[in-house]
Amino acid sequence: MSEPTLFERIIAREIPADIVYEDERVIAFRDINPQAPMHILVCPKKPIPKVADAAAADDELLGYVLRKAGEIATAEGHGEGFRLVVNNGAPVGQTVFHIHVHVLGGRGFGWPPG
Ligand code: AMP
């Protein structure tokens, strides 16, 4: 067994986090190093390392994560405009290998992304 990731440890309450939403399938908490006024991470509780590792059996769960990300952004007052980011792999900046959706809002965002 590999070591539990940071996010598994947050799910297990071994590490504190500012949790904004949780149910049996997902958890959402504020990023410790926010890049926007709203910066929340939404994670499935199932520890899938990255998008490229997802299986067909995860389709419904990942759709659920996406829908919850939208609901949380709306509940935070940013339903009119928010950006979702999912890093897949160290070359593009993934640092925690447990799938998570960054939910960012409260400022403008450029395109293309950096
Ligand atoms: P990524 O680089 O896409 O893997 O995103 C990982 C995110 O986790 C980064 O934005 C970090 O700031 C954030 N992060 C790291 N440690 C914690 C923590 N203890 N609580 C909340 N967010 C964290």
Image (tube, rainbow, N blue to C red):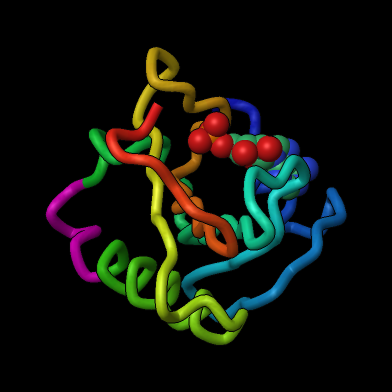
* Residue 108, horizontal then vertical, whole percent: 49, 53
Please identify the residue farthest to the left as the structure is shown: 56
Q: Does residue 40 appear to the left or right of 66 in the view shown?
A: right
Residue 14 to residue 57: above or below: above
Image side of residue 5 versus residue 74, left or right: right
Say which residue appears at 71% left-offset and 59% top-offset. Answer: 30
Report the residue that reaches farthest toward the top.
91
Q: Choose between 103 and 49: the one closer to the eye.
A: 103
Residue 14, percent across and down?
Answer: 84, 51
Residue at 44% x, 48% y: name it: 109
Residue 95 visible in image: yes
- In the rendered image, the quadrant that contains the N terminus is top right
Q: Is residue 32 magenta?
A: no
- Quadrant (top left/top right/bottom left/bottom right) for the C terminus: top left
**Image quarter where ligand 1 lies:** top right
Please say if 64 is above or below 89.
Answer: below
Residue interval drawn in magenta: 55-60
Q: Position of residue 82 (x, y in %)?
A: 44, 64
Label the magenta part by its dominant secondary structure: helix
Q: Is residue 6 visible?
A: no
**How far across and down, in percent of the image, does residue 71 sit?**
45, 82
In the picture, residue 52 is in which quadrant? Answer: top left
Residue 90 vertical placement versus 19 (above, below): above
105 or 85: which is nearer to us? 105
